[in-house]
Amino acid sequence: MSAPIVNRVANSALQVIDLEELYQEGTRTLLDLTDFLDEGILLREQSFRERLQNHNWNAYKNHFVAVYCPEDILVPQWAPLLVVAYLQPVVKAVVVGDVEDLEQHLFAEKLFAFDTKPYENGLVMIKGCANKPVPEQALGLLAAKLTPIVKKLSYGEACSSVPLYRRK
């Protein structure tokens, strides 16, 4: 008779952090500033403000919104801020930038409040594979937050992890 199969990972002191669990569910919307410009390229303040006033902002209710302007279109710095002012009362979150900037913001928000106390002096692994978008910046923020407090930090999966840090 063969010996029973033992899950050594489940029985180890290794603590796995899955950043995918910090993903905030909800609709992501990229709002292109050029939609409010004359001919999509020129900002005339009066017509810009009129378009903003007449826009249906409730269409973004409870969305996560990135207010985006292509790099080749020049607008004054106040323009996206005015759009943010219209969006802020109806959205869950808004950033000036692209969808990647939005994801970075959402993860940074969660990681700022992330309790590291359970990981003090622990053997910790940041889970590598995810089905949801986890920005590299979020991985970096988490590693920076954990490095001063853990005994050992690695990245990946239990079967093939990469050591990142070991306290001397």
Image (cartoon, rainbow, N blue to C red):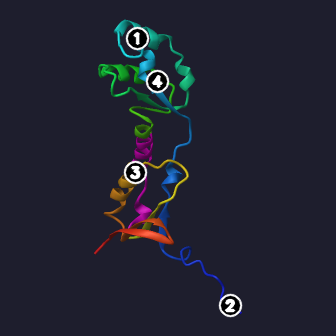
- Distance from disc 4 to disc 1, alpha carbons, whole Å, reads 21 Å
- Residue tagged by mark 1? 38
Residue 83 vs 101, above or below: the answer is above
- Residue tagged by mark 2? 2
Residue in the foreground of this view, choosing between 131 and 11: 131
Question: What SS does tag 4 mark?
Answer: helix
- Residue tagged by mark 4? 87
- Depth check, mark 4 against mark 2: the one in front is 2
- Distance from disc 3 to disc 1, alpha carbons, whole Å, reads 37 Å
- Is the C-beta separation of discs 4 and 1 under 8 Å? no
| Dot 1 crowding, Cα within 10 Å, few <14, some 14–19, many 20+ | some
- Disc 4 marks which amino acid? Leu
Q: Is residue 73 magenta?
A: no
- Depth check, mark 4 against mark 1: the one in front is 1
- Depth check, mark 3 against mark 1: the one in front is 1
Residue in the foreground of this view, choosing between 105 and 119: 105
- Residue tagged by mark 3? 136
